[in-house]
Image: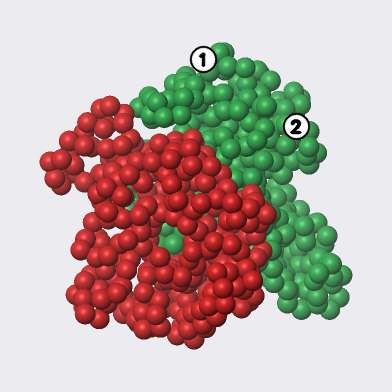
Chain colours: A red, B green
C-alpha cells in the first residue's frame, strides 16, 4: 500500500467538526467535475490510491477513470463497503431481512440466484453476504482494487454481536473472488485484532482512527500503541488530524512516531493541503522507519 | 455480571445488542423478536438464547435488566410487566403514545426503586451536555426563547405501510423525529404549559406527518419554537440544531459544536470569555467502552448499567423526562388538530 491514501469524506459533506463546513463541501462537490478536479490534483501530486465508499456517485468517478485509461494508468481504488446509509434507510422500512433482500440482485447470474436462494432457506449467511459484496463491487469492474475494506459500522456491529464468522466470510470472498486483500475499518482496534487472530486471518489490513487526541480510539492511546508494537497487522491510520482539531505538522509527526504504521488516509480539497500533507509525510518517513 | 435481555431487533435493537454485548459487566441472557428467521440466524452464529414471546422470556430467564426496542405502541405493556417483575428498564423512544401512561410507568418504576431510562441519545452527546451544563450555571442569564430545528432525509416518497407510517402506532415525524429536539427542549426548560400554532403536515406520507412546526409556552414567559422536517434530502442525515437566547448571551449547538456568545455582564464560566466561544465534538466527547455508531449510544447504555450498579445518582434520561416529552408531543398534536 502507498504511504498516503486519499479519502472521500470531503466529497460527500462528511465533516466531524462542523455541519456548516459539511454543507459547504456538499454544495461545492455537487458536480462530478469538481470531484474529478481534486482527484486529478491528488494524482498529479503523487497520491494515487483513492479509498472511497461504494456511494452511487463513486460509480460516476469510476466511469470517468475507465474512460481515460492513459490519464489514470496508476490510479487505484480502495473501495469501502457497504455505503451504510443505503442499508440503514432500507432497514428502517423493511427490517434487516427485507433490507438484505432488497439489495441482493434479483436477476443476475444463475449461480448468484442459487447462492442466494439456498442461503435464505438454510439461514446461511455466507451466500447472502457474498452476493451483497458482489453487488457492491459491480461499479468497479475492470479497475484496480488491490484492497477492499469493510466499513466500521458493519465490522463493529458484527464484532459486538459476536457474528465473527461474517468477517471471515468477507475476507475469504475478497481474496478468492476479487483477488484482492481484505481490509477492516474499526473504531475498536485492540478488540478486533484479537478476533481476527482467533479467526486465523493473518497479518490483516486494519484501518482505525489514530490521532494525538485519542479521538475515536476505543481502548485508549496506550492500548493502540501496544498493539502497534506487538501485533502483526498492517495498520492504516485515519482521522489523524481529528477533523482538524490537531495542527497538520503536529498530527503527522505524532502518528509518524508510532511503530508500524503502513499508511495514512486523509481528505483534502485544495492543492495546497494535498501537497503540504504529502510533504509532511515524505519528510517524516524518509528519516527512518518511523519519524521519531 | 448483570443479566440483560433485548426485546425487538430492528435497527435500534440490533445496535443496542451489539453495544451492550461488549460491556464488561453484562451478560446478554436472551433476545426476543417476532422474526423467527432473524432469531435462527442469531442463534446459529452466536448461540444466544432466543424467544419470540417476551412473556415467556420474562418467565424463563432470571433478568436484571431489559432493553425494549419494539414499535412504540408495545412499550407500555412490556415495560409495565418488566417493572412488576422487578427488572430495570431501558426503553427506546418515544416512550409511550399517551402521556398518562408514561407518567404511570415513571411513578411505578420509582416506587419499585428501579433504574429507568429512555433512549434519548442526544442527552449523551457532548455538545448538548455542554449546553445543559451552561444553562444550569445560568451562563446566559435568564432564558427567554429556544429554537429547536431538525431536518433530514427519512421520507422522500410514499412508503408501504408499517408502524412507522401510522401515527396511531407511533409513526411519523412528530414521534420519530421531533421527539428528539423536543426532548432537549424539555430537558432545558421543563414541561410546557401549552402549545400554539401547531402544524403537523404530510408531504409524502398518507397516514402520518412529515413536517412539524409549533410554539411551546413555559412558565415565566419562556417560549420555544420547533421547525422539524424529515423529508429534506439536502441533509445527508438527521441534523438537529438548538439556538437559545438569554438575558446575558446566546448559545447555538448541534451534534458537532457549541457556539456561545456572552455579553459583557455575563459571569463567565471557567474556560470561557466574554464575546464568542466555540467548543467542538473532539474536545467535548468522552471515550466509550465500545464504539458502533456514535459515542452517545455507548455512553447511554453505560450510564444505564452503572446506574443499576449504583455508580450514578443522577438520572440523565429517565421515564419522567420522557413523559414530559410525551406531554409536549400530545399538546402539539391536540393544537394542530384544533388549528385545522
Residue B180's place in the image compared with B257, above or below, is: above
The residue nearer to you, when weighing B20 against B36, is B20
The residue nearer to you, when weighing A281 against B72, is A281
* In-image side of A32 versus B240 (left or right): left
The tag on residue A261 is: none
Label 1, on which residue?
Answer: B56
Mark 2, Cα crowd under 10 Å, few <14 / some 14-19 / many 20+, is few
Residue at the extreme front of the image, as rendered:
A288
Label 2, on which residue?
Answer: B309
Q: Quadrant of residue A106?
A: top left
The residue nearer to you, when weighing B288 against A260, is A260
Q: Quadrant of residue B145?
A: bottom right
Q: Residue at x 31, y 55 (%)?
A: A180
- The answer for which chain carries disc 1 is B
Q: Quadrant of residue B85?
A: top right
Q: Position of residue A122 (x, y in %)?
A: 28, 27
Q: Residue at x 51, y 51 (%)?
A: A232
The mark that comes first in sequence, 1 or 2, is: 1
Does the rendering let one see residue B65? yes
The residue nearer to you, when weighing B261 against B144, is B261
Q: Residue at x 56, y 44 (%)?
A: A191
User: Does dot 1 land on a helix, a strand or a loop?
Assistant: helix
Residue B262's place in the image compared with A123, above or below, is: below
* In-image side of B232 versus A121 (left or right): right
Task: State the separation of the CA atoms marked 1 and 2.
Answer: 26 Å
Q: Where does the N terminus of chain A fall, quadrant-wise? A: bottom left
User: Does dot 2 land on a helix, a strand or a loop?
Assistant: loop
The reply to whether callout 1 and callout 2 are in contact (CB within 8 Å) is no
Q: Position of residue A10 (x, y in %)?
A: 45, 71
Q: Where does the C terminus of chain A fall, quadrant-wise? A: bottom right
Amino acid at each position: 500500500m502507498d504511504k498516503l491514501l486519499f479519502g472521500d469524506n470531503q466529497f460527500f459533506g462528511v465533516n466531524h467538526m462542523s455541519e456548516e463546513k459539511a454543507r459547504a463541501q456538499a454544495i461545492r462537490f455537487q458536480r462530478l467535475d469538481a470531484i474529478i478536479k481534486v482527484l486529478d490534483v491528488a494524482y498529479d501530486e503523487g497520491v494515487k490510491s483513492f479509498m472511497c465508499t461504494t456511494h452511487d456517485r463513486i460509480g460516476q468517478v469510476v466511469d470517468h477513470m475507465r474512460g481515460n485509461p492513459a490519464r489514470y494508468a496508476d490510479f487505484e481504488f480502495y473501495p469501502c463497503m457497504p455505503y451504510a446509509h443505503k442499508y440503514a434507510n432500507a432497514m428502517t422500512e423493511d427490517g434487516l431481512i427485507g433490507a438484505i433482500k432488497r439489495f441482493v440482485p434479483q436477476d443476475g447470474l444463475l449461480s448468484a440466484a442459487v447462492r442466494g436462494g439456498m442461503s435464505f432457506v438454510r439461514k446461511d449467511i455466507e451466500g447472502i453476504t457474498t452476493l451483497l459484496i458482489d453487488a457492491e463491487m459491480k461499479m468497479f469492474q475492470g479497475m484496480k482494487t488491490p484492497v477492499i475494506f469493510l466499513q466500521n459500522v458493519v465490522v463493529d456491529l458484527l464484532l459486538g454481536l459476536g457474528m465473527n464468522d461474517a468477517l471471515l466470510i468477507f475476507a475469504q470472498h475478497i481474496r478468492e473472488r476479487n483477488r484482492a486483500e481484505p481490509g477492516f475499518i474499526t473504531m475498536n482496534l485492540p478488540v478486533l485484532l484479537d478476533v481476527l487472530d482467533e479467526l486465523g486471518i493473518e497479518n490483516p489490513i486494519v484501518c482505525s482512527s489514530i490521532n494525538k487526541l485519542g479521538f475515536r480510539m476505543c481502548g485508549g492511546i496506550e492500548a493502540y500503541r501496544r498493539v502497534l508494537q506487538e501485533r502483526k497487522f498492517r495498520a492504516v491510520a485515519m482521522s489523524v488530524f481529528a477533523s482538524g482539531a490537531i495542527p497538520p505538522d503536529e498530527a503527522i509527526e505524532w502518528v509518524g512516531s508510532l511503530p508500524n504504521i503502513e499508511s495514512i488516509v486523509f481528505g483534502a480539497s485544495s492543492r495546497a493541503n494535498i501537497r503540504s500533507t504529502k510533504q509532511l509525510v515524505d519528510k517524516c518517513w524518509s528519516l527512518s522507519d518511523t519519524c521519531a | 455480571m448483570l443479566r440483560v435481555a433485548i426485546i425487538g431487533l430492528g435497527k435500534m435493537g440490533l445496535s443496542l445488542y451489539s453495544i451492550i454485548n461488549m460491556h464488561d459487566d453484562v451478560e446478554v441472557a436472551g433476545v426476543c423478536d417476532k422474526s423467527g428467521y432473524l432469531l435462527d440466524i442469531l442463534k446459529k452464529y452466536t448461540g444466544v438464547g432466543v424467544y419470540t414471546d417476551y412473556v415467556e422470556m420474562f418467565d424463563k430467564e432470571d433478568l436484571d435488566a431489559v432493553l425494549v426496542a419494539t414499535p412504540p405502541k408495545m412499550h407500555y405493556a412490556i415495560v409495565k410487566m418488566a417493572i412488576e417483575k422487578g427488572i430495570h428498564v431501558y426503553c427506546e423512544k418515544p416512550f409511550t403514545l399517551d402521556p398518562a401512561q408514561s407518567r404511570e410507568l415513571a411513578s411505578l418504576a420509582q416506587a419499585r426503586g428501579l433504574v429507568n431510562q429512555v433512549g434519548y441519545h442526544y442527552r449523551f452527546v457532548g455538545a448538548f451536555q455542554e449546553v445543559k451544563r451552561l444553562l444550569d450555571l445560568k451562563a446566559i442569564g435568564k432564558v427567554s426563547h429556544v429554537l429547536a430545528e431538525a431536518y433530514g432525509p427519512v421520507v422522500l416518497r410514499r412508503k408501504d405501510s408499517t408502524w412507522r407510517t401510522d401515527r396511531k402506532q407511533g409513526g411519523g415525524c412528530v414521534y420519530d423525529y421531533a421527539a428528539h429536539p423536543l426532548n432537549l427542549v424539555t430537558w432545558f426548560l421543563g414541561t410546557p404549559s401549552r402549545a400554539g400554532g401547531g402544524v403537523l403536515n404530510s408531504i409524502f406520507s398518507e397516514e402520518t406527518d412529515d413536517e412539524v412546526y409549533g410554539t411551546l409556552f413555559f412558565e415565566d414567559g419562556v417560549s420555544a419554537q420547533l421547525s422539524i422536517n424529515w423529508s429534506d434530502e439536502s441533509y445527508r442525515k438527521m441534523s438537529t440544531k438548538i439556538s437559545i437566547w438569554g438575558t446575558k448571551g446566546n448559545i447555538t449547538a448541534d451534534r458537532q459544536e457549541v457556539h456561545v456568545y456572552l455579553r459583557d455582564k455575563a459571569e463567565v464560566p471557567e474556560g470561557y470569555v466574554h464575546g464568542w466561544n466555540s467548543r467542538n465534538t473532539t474536545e467535548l466527547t468522552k471515550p466509550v467502552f465500545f464504539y458502533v455508531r456514535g459515542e452517545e449510544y455507548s455512553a447511554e447504555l453505560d450510564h444505564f448499567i452503572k446506574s443499576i450498579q449504583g455508580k450514578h445518582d443522577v438520572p440523565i434520561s429517565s421515564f419522567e423526562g420522557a413523559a414530559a416529552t410525551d406531554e409536549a408531543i400530545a399538546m402539539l398534536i391536540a393544537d394542530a388538530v384544533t388549528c385545522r
